[in-house]
Image (tube, coloured by chain):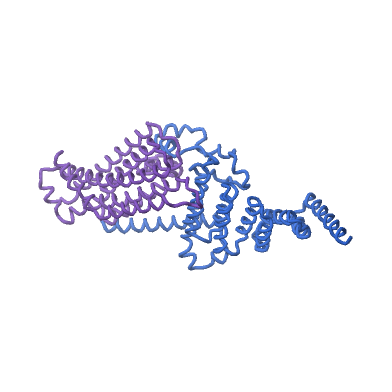
Chain colours: A blue, B purple
Amino acid sequence: MKRIIGSVSAAVFVFAVLMLALKIDVFFYLENARSYARQSDVLYNIFGQLRNDIAAILYLKSDEYFHGGTEHPHGEEHTIADELSGEHKHHEDVPSQRQRGKEEDADIFLRLDRAIHAHRVQHLAPDQSAEIVPWFSLAVLVDPEYVQAYVVGGYWLGMRLNRPDEALLFLKKGLKSNPQAWQIYSQIGDIYFLAKKDYRKAAAYLERAYLAMDAPDVNKIDKKHVLIFLATAWERLEDYRKSVYYYEKLEALVPDPDVAKKIAGLNAQIKGISVYGQE
Amino acid sequence: MKAVFLIAANLMREIFRKKDFYVLLLLLLLLLVYLLNAAFFGIRDVFRYMKEIGLGLVFLFSLLISVPFAAKVMIDEAASKTIYALLAKPLSRFQVIIGKFLGSLFVAWCSFSFFFFLFVLASVYKQGVFTGILYFQVYVAGLCLLLVLTAMTLCLSVYCTFSTTITLAYMIYFLMSWFGGGLHESLYKIPLLGQAVYYALPHFEFFDLRHRLIHLWEPVPAWVMLALVAYACLYSGAMLLCARYGFNKRWL
């Protein structure tokens, strides 16, 4: 009897672990789909995916910390980084804020569970924002190819915590493991542009990002972001020809009358300079 | 009652004889020192990650001590046949179980207390603030968790072999800790049976107050702490009765 119970429990345990691993694997695969080359590598899938999953868990910790230790409401995303500073409407719609049902009032276990684990979703106060940073560092320590952790970590360090030098070091470390990651080049460019005001370096990194963005899976919004910063960087450096070149790329990507006006204005300036030069 | 305490006292000394306890204590100390000195990007005034990892290690190491210890107390007695000498004494079988349980519980609580004390020292040193009530609540919840876990493991050990007991105990603990909170959604769909299963399972997730300490949430109300203690006592009592039933049926 003991042997049967032992065998059955061991089988159930192995099955549960396998199912759990599979579930986690599928979840993170969908959350953070990586390159096709990596996913199709059999050895990588056997041994490497666990490392990715652990790194993803560590990375998701940063999101949990940002929401004060609570899970972010499902289906809602922070798509625009600048919106992060405020409190969002969907934060009020999580179970902790909902009206309790009659069933829950009557059930002591549900009430107890709620009293222990439910808490309102609230962003970290600005002076506590640094609490999320260790998780980016730990995530890339486990998986140095985790591009998203570098990018978001770099953003937080450079833009939100006012530590552009540390952000640049972190992102450049990421480039060593991910030399083709346009997201990292783009983030470095953003930091040089916005935080360091070094437009020449910003333009250099953004150009690398733009060149690396040739893959079909790169969306228009990301390309637009890079092109705007790139064109503006060259404009600030008074290299209007290059600026026009990138504004034209932007116009071709997302037609916009304001961009067309900008191009016309810059072309007029180029002509004025060249006429002045000939005189 | 004296005999029960004698059996328990005999086991209690084990904690200081066990090498794995000292190894884990030293390992925890080293990891806490490492976490204390870790500086991410020159930012030194962050402490939540340290509390999260530190508390996780405290609970994990306590499990590593308590589950195998509780699993082997009855099985070792049976394997070495000393159980017969024990049963020859004027003791009821339930008293033997209670004695073994108290000894195992002391070992579990003692190791958890040492680990937790180290963690509190490190945490207060890093954070510079001592939120006493939160630490107290997490500590009490940890003791309650070990109470249920020890009773459950002891109960399993009466029915199963050593390896099966450990496998089942860890499996139940981890599955309930991870998924216990969402179980009611699926189990309550089956009107009576589902609800009964939900109540019968050991809800280890109730004892996890770590989030409150890590993210400085407000302490839980007093009724919640009382309910946790009551639940732990009732559940472990039920487990011991179950163990008694099994013990009465076996090794006659």
Relative to B52, residue B218 above or below? above
Relative to A147, residue B151 above or below? above
Q: Residue at x 48, y 38 (%)?
A: A119
The residue most toward the front is: A279
Res. A263 image quadrant: bottom right
Percent position of residue A71, x then y = 50, 44
- Say whether residue B87 is left or right of residue B113: left
- Say whether residue A192 is left or right of residue A58: right
Viewer can see residue B193: no
Which of these two is toward me, A273 or B33? A273
Percent position of residue B9, x then y = 18, 45
Which of these two is toward me, A41 or B39? B39
Viewer can see residue A260: yes
Q: Residue at x 14, y 55 (%)?
A: B81
Percent position of residue A277, x then y = 85, 60
The quadrant of the image that shows the C terminus of chain A is bottom right
Which of these two is toward me, B113 or A275? A275
Percent position of residue B237, x then y = 27, 40
Which of these two is toward me, A197 or A8? A197
The quadrant of the image that shows the N terminus of chain A is bottom left
Relative to A72, residue A212 above or below? below
- Say whether residue A24 is left or right of residue B110: right
